[in-house]
Image (cartoon, rainbow, N blue to C red):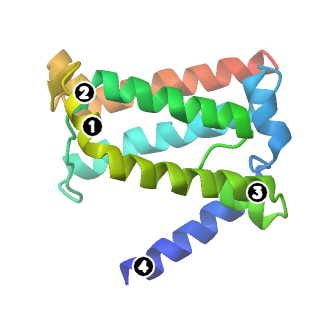
């Protein structure tokens, strides 16, 4: 049943991505050159919904929340690799299957590259764990823990700030 729900959810998100035109190379190139912020506004909208949804579901006890440990250096290196891949290819991983579905075969190279990268990481994991995971290892921390505030309140404030930023971008014509 979970697989069916995942499939249906994926189809719905693929349709939304395609209708919002964020599976297009031009939209991602526009974001990376700061000339078209459609992709950024779409992604931030998802973060707004996620920030509120996760905190609301966990506060109501409807979903478990499993906090992962923070590894600053590993997160930084992973972010650089992710960003370079996005900049070189012109797609983020979530939009590549949609681009391929629309007939953009360049997204297929990104999917294959991502799979190869995942395999390379899996095979070299002991090296990364030894050399990188100890740098900036803060354990399981979160913004609500650091601020000593209820998670739902922090999620609502964060979502509100992001929403205000999205409205600002719209008003500025970006």
For marks 3 and 2, give the one nearer the viewer: 2
For residue 76, which quarter of the picture? Answer: top left
- x%, y% of residue 95? 67, 52
**Which label number is shown at residue 127?**
1
- x%, y% of residue 114? 56, 51
- Which numbered disc flags the more N-terminal residue, 3 or 4? 4
Marks 2/4: CA–CA distance: 36 Å
- x%, y% of residue 83? 58, 30
Q: Which residue is mark 4?
A: 3
Q: Which sits in the foreground, 30 or 129?
A: 129
In which quadrant will I find the N terminus? Answer: bottom left
Residue at point 29%, 42% (across, down)? 55
**Which label number is shown at residue 131?**
2
Kindly state the secondary structure of the residue where label 1 is placed: helix
Q: Is residue 78 left or right of residue 95?
A: left
- x%, y% of residue 61? 17, 55
Seen in the picture, residue 31 relative to 68 is either above or below; the reply is above
The reply to whether residue 41 is in sight is no
Marks 3/2: CA–CA distance: 36 Å
For marks 3 and 4, give the one nearer the viewer: 3
Q: Which sits in the foreground, 154 or 98?
A: 98
The reply to whether residue 72 is in sight is yes
Q: Is residue 26 left or right of residue 32?
A: right
In which quadrant will I find the C terminus? Answer: top right
Kindly state the secondary structure of the residue where label 2 is placed: helix
Marks 1/2: CA–CA distance: 6 Å
Whether label 1 touches label 2, CB < 8 Å: yes
**Which label number is shown at residue 99?**
3
């Amino acid at each position: 049943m979970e697989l069916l729900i995942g499939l249906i959810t994926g189809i719905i998100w693929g349709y939304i991505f395609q209708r919002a035109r964020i599976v297009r190379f031009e939209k991602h190139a526009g974001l990376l050159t700061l000339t078209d912020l459609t992709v950024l506004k779409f992604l931030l909208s998802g973060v707004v919904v996620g920030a509120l949804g996760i905190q609301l579901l966990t506060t109501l006890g409807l979903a478990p929340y499993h906090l992962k440990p923070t590894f600053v250096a590993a997160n930084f290196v992973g972010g650089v690799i992710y960003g370079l891949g996005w900049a070189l290819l012109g797609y983020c991983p979530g939009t590549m299957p949609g681009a391929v579905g629309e007939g953009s075969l360049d997204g297929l190279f990104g999917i294959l590259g991502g799979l190869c990268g995942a395999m390379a990481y899996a095979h070299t994991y002991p090296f990364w764990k030894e050399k990188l995971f100890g740098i900036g290892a803060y354990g399981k921390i979160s913004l609500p823990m650091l601020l000593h505030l209820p998670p739902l309140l922090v999620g609502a404030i964060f979502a509100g700030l992001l929403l205000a930023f999205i409205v600002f971008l719209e008003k500025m014509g970006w």
